[in-house]
Amino acid sequence: MKPWVRDTLRSLGRYLAIFGGGLAVFMVVAPIVGYSTYGDRPPAGWHGWFPPLEWSEFPGYLLFVTEFLGVLLLPWAAVLFLVPLATVRYLERRAASRWLTATVGGVLTGALSSYALLGAAWYVSLGLAPFIAGVVLATYVGACQLPHSQRTGRAA
């Protein structure tokens, strides 16, 4: 396999694991502490302390989270992720500073992931807290995980 294909697949897999997996964990854990992550009636938000979701409803909720992420969000986010990936790799080939590369990667990944998340969130009336968690996770991937470390020799 060509190195650029392997790099693209590795970066995409890392992005989907952190962004999608972190958002899934947030959406599964939040109802346990009383936060409803989505809904129109009742709206998303705090509804008591311990679970607004009955344990018998939990498997259905896990299925919903899987469908929401797997069908609505992650395919579009994966396509949009190719833009920051190409931009960061271009900046690295042009020997841009690590700071600039990380900043551009974080801003682009956060912005495009929030765009995909807004589209999917509108469909299910997602709350503000999962949206913010998703944007923070995507920005982290773009700023910290996406750029390769530029190893330069240190002067002694």
Image (cartoon, rainbow, N blue to C red):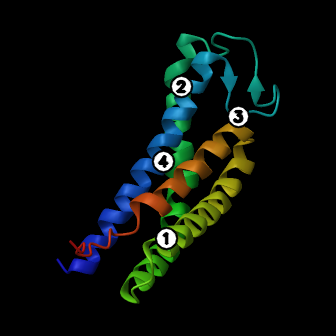
Front tag of 3 and 2? 2
Dividing the image into 4 quarters, which one contains the N terminus?
A: bottom left
Asked if disc 1 and disc 4 are in contact, CB closer than 8 Å, the reply is: no
Asked if disc 4 and disc 2 are in contact, CB closer than 8 Å, the reply is: no
Query: In this figure, which residue is indicated by the disc labeled 1?
Result: 99
Tell me where residue 5 sits by quadrant: bottom left
Q: Which residue type carries mark 4?
A: Gly
Front tag of 1 and 4? 1
Question: Could you tell me which secondary element the residue under label 2 belongs to?
Answer: helix
Disc 1 or 3, which lies upstream in sequence? 3
Residue found at x 48% / y 48% = 20
Question: Could you tell me which secondary element the residue under label 1 belongs to?
Answer: helix
Residue found at x 50% / y 54% = 140
Dividing the image into 4 quarters, which one contains the C terminus?
A: bottom left
Disc 1 or 2, which lies upstream in sequence? 2
The image's mark for residue 20 is: 4
Q: What is the distance, in whole Å, between disc 4 and disc 2 at their CAs?
A: 14 Å
Disc 4 or 2, which lies upstream in sequence? 4
Q: Which residue type carries mark 2?
A: Val
